[in-house]
Amino acid sequence: MCQKGEECKQELQQFNITAKIKILELNMDDYKSVQSFATALQREVSVVDILILNAGIGLLKFERSPSGHERVTQVNYLSNVLLITALVPHLKESAEKTGRPVRVTWVGSRMYFDTSLDKKAPLKTGESVLEHMDSKEFFLANQRYNDSKLLCAMSMYSLAPRLDKSKIVLTMVCPGLVNTNMTDVLPLHVRMVMGVVKTLFARPVEVGGRLFIHAAVVAGPESHGRFLGDKDIIEYGFCPVTLSCRLKRTFDD
């Protein structure tokens, strides 16, 4: 994992040879790694200006993380929530030192509009969200990524009002389909299909990066607790009222 970081560092320093770049190991599939990273970041980086949460995977078969949770849910949702929570005190301190809010940009997806939690695999009465996501019975390969991104969005909508936006501005952004290596974990025949799809429809990485920068630097305080589709705020209202209200109660609790 650190090797990937070093390779990225070398590429970045081609644009600015004097840039100071530190590599810290982070495995979003492992709670202990997330906690260790949060501790190391607070020790190594005295002030955080921008935090971009970009980790995410999509799998077509049910797998479990070391925590016992379903792996897509773990990486895309649970570990991101843990990381934000662990870093909130440090982010507040950073804002107090600089006199400006820390910008936290969480990468989401408009795919969460199409969730299996609505009709295809609805929550049972009395069933918790995590129980549902950890059940192999309700794992729908083509929609698990969407479902995990729904949980991310609901978490963002629930967390943002509890944060002082003069200290932390939390925004979620969907850059659309970007031509990255995210599909490398998929089976060969799926990768071949996705290769064609990405060639025809995906945005270059540079375009996706510019949308991240817009969310983190250009968008104003009105973006706090909001979901950006490219550069525009998308209003909350993505799923039936009954599901929306039930999930909202879960996250508020």
Image (tube, helix red, strand yellow):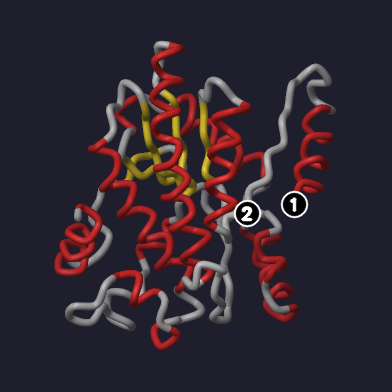
Of 100 and 43, the residue lying toward us: 43
* Above or below, 127 relative to 57: below
- Horizontal arrangement in the rendering, residue 132 relative to residue 33 (left or right): left
Q: Quadrant of residue 228?
A: top left
Q: Name the secondary structure under disc 1.
A: loop
Residue shown at 43% from the left, 64% from the top: 148
- On screen, residue 133 above or below 49: below
Q: Residues within 10 Å of mark 2 (few under 14, many from 20)?
A: some
Residue farthest toward the bottom in the current orientation of the protein: 137
Marks 1,2: beta carbons within 8 A:
yes
Specify the quadrant of the image occupied by residue 127. bottom left
- Residue 92 shows which numbered tag? none
Query: Which quadrant of the figure contains the C terminus?
Result: bottom left
User: Is residue 132 placed above or below 213 in the rendered structure?
Assistant: below
Choose top left, top right, bottom left or bottom right for residue 96.
top left
Task: Rate crowding at label 1 as few (under 14), some (14 to 19) or many (20 or more) other CA atoms within 10 Å.
Answer: few
Residue 61 horizontal side relative to residue 24, left or right:
left
For the image, the number of numbered tags is: 2
Instruction: Report the amino acid beneath label 1.
Output: Met
* Residue bearing the label numbered 1: 1
Name above or below for residue 5 compared with residue 176: above
Q: Is residue 1 left or right of residue 143?
A: right
How far is the residue under mark 1 from the one under mark 2?
8 Å
